[in-house]
Image: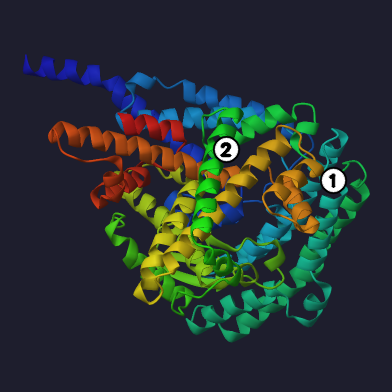
Amino acid sequence: MIFCGFSAATLAAYPYFHADARFVSFTEDFFLQELRSDPLQFHYAIDNPSAFGVDETALCMPVYRAGDAASDAYALSVLSDRLDSFAHAHLSQANRCLYELLDTYLSDLRRTAAYPYFAEPLSPSSGAVSELPLLLAEYRLDDRADIEQYFAVLEQIPDYLDGLITYEQEKAAAGLFMADATADKVIRQCADLMDADTLDNGTHFLETTFDNRLQTLVDNGVITAAERDGYRSNHRRLLVTVVAPAYDRVADELTILKGSGGDIGGLARYAGGREYYEALLHLTTGSSRSVDGIRQFLYNDLSEHYGELMRLLQADESLNGLLMSDPAYLPQMTPEAILEHLQEAIAADYPAIPADTGTSPPDCTVKYVDAALAPYSAPAFYMTPPIDNIGNNTIYINESDISGDLSLFTTLAHEGYPGHLYQTVYSRQHWAASGVTPLRSILSYGGYVEGWAMYAEMNAYDYAVELAGESYPEAAACYRACRLDRQIQLCLYSLLDIAIHYDGASLQDVTEILTAFGFTDPDTIAAVYAYIAEEPCNYPKYYAGYLEIMELKRQAAKIWLDRHKAANPGAAYTLTDIYRDRDFLRSFHRFLLENGPADFATLSKLLGS
C-alpha cells in the first residue's frame, strides 16, 4: 500500500516535473541560440565558452540576406508557438513567472517586427558604424585563441556591413530610407572612424588599444614579444585592407542611395509609422500605457516640476546666477574616488550586493572615450561584464560631454552606484544564488534598465548635497534647481519624441515649443529635432522608464502605509514619512533588483501580489 501510494503521487507529479524540465531546456536553447548568432555579443556575454558547450571559433557574424526582414515576424511567431506548447499550469511558480515574462516579451517583439523596414541599424547615434569600433577596442583578449577569434571577426566585417547595405537598399525601395542629412552624418562617421592618416601612421585608436592589450599578455607571460609583433603586423593589415575598405563601401553605397529619403522627420509621415511607433514605444519603455497615456504621464510630471522650479527661482533670485556659473561645491575627486564614495553613501538606502562576486566589491575600471569616438559617443556608458565573470566592470567617460563636478558626480551615479553597475551585478548575483536561467540576462528591458539608472541619477543630487556639506549651505537649493532642470529637459524631450513621431510635429512646431521654454539658438533646436527624429523612443526609454519606477514606488509606499496602519492603529504615519524610511527604501529597492529587469505591468502585478 505504501508503494502504491508513492507511485500514485509520483505519477500525479510527473506532468509538473516533466513540464519544468522541458521548459528549462527551451530557455537554455533560446539563450544559446541568441548568443551564438553574434560572436561579438557572445564574447562580451560569456567568459568561458566551454562551460556552455560552445565552440567560439565556429561562430560567424550575422549577415543580413535579401528579404530577411520580412521573415523575422515568422521566426518570432514560431518561437511564440513553441512557448505556447508548454502547459502553463504545470510549471513551477518561478518558471510560470518566466513564461509570462517571455510571452509578453515575444508579443512586443512581434508587434515591431510587423513593420520590417522602419528600424535603422545605421543610425548616426547608435548604429553599427559607430558601435563596432568601440566593441572592437574593448574586445577581451585573454589568450592566443581570443586573438585569433578577434581576427576572425575583423575578417567578417565586410560581409556584415554588406548585409546592412542590402537592408538599406530594401528600405530605400520601400520608401523608408534615411534623410539625406542623416546619411551625410553616417558617411562622415565612416571617414572619421577609419581615418586614413592615423591608419597610415599607426596611431589609429584600434591599433593603440590592441597594442595595449597585447602588451598586457606579454607582461603576464601569455605570449612572447615576437608573437606580439606578429599579431600587431597582422592586425594592421586587417584594418587597412579589410575593415577600412568595408567602411568606404558603406559610405559609397549611402551616397548612391541619397535622394530617396527626403528631409529629416518623424515616423508619423509614413504609412504605418504611427502604428510602428506605438509598438516601439511599448517595447522600448516597458510601459503598458497607450501613447496618449504616456503623453499625459509625462505632461503631468513636466507641469509639476516646471512649476516647482519657477517657484524656487522666484524665492531665491540668486539661483539664476548660480546655475549659469556652474559653481564647484563638491571636493575635487577622481572618478574612482567618486565611485568609492557613492558605494558608501548608498549603503543606508540600498541593499548590499549578494555575495559572492569573487571580488567584493566588484572591480571597476574607468576609461575615457577616444577623441575619434567622442562626437558619436554618449557622455558616459557602462560596459556590461560577462554573465560568468561579473567581477570586472568598465565605465567609459566622454570628457567632451561632461561639464563640471556635479555633472561627473551624477553621471557616475547613473553608470555606477547605484546605477547600471550596481543593478547589473546585484541582479546577476541574485539570479545565480536563486538558480534563475541566464536567459534573463539577454532579454532587453530598456525602460527598466535606463529608468533605474535615471532613478539613481536623480537620487545622486541628494548625495551631492550631503557631500557639499556645511561648507556650502547654498548647494542644497542650487542642486535642487539643477535636478529640476534636468528632469524638465528630459521630460520635454520625451514629449517631443511623441509629438515628432506620433503627431507628425515639424521643425517649426518644435521650434515654437522649445522657444517657449527658453531655447533661443536655432542650431541647438535643429540639433535636438534631428536627434529625436533619428532616435525614436530613446528619451522616453529613459524618462518614461524613470516615471514608471516612481509610480511603482508610490504603489509600494501605499502598501507599506496600509500595513503600518493595520499594525499600529491611530499612529500618525504618512506617505512622506515612508519615503524617508530607510527600511522602506531598502525593501523597495530590493524588490526592483530581484524582480527586474522586466516590463512594468509585470512588476506592478508582482508588487501587489
Q: Is residue 12 above or below residue 518?
A: above
Residue at 25% x, 37% y is 560
Note whether residue 359 is visible: no
Q: Which of 16 and 526 is in front in this view?
A: 526
In the image: residue 540, left or right of residue 609: right
Q: Furthest-left residue in view?
A: 1
The x and y percentages for residue 212 are: 59, 79
The x and y percentages for residue 129 are: 74, 57
Amino acid on which disc 2 is placed: Tyr
Residue at 80% x, 44% y is 507
Q: Is residue 200 above or below residue 452?
A: below
Q: Which mark is residue 196?
A: none
Amino acid on which disc 1 is placed: Ala
Q: In which quarter of the image is residue 473?
A: bottom left
Q: Which mark is residue 179?
A: 1
Q: How crowded is mark 1: few (under 14 residues within 10 Å), some or many (20 or more)?
A: some
Note whether residue 316 is visible: yes
Q: Quadrant of the C terminus?
A: top left
The residue under label 2 is 299
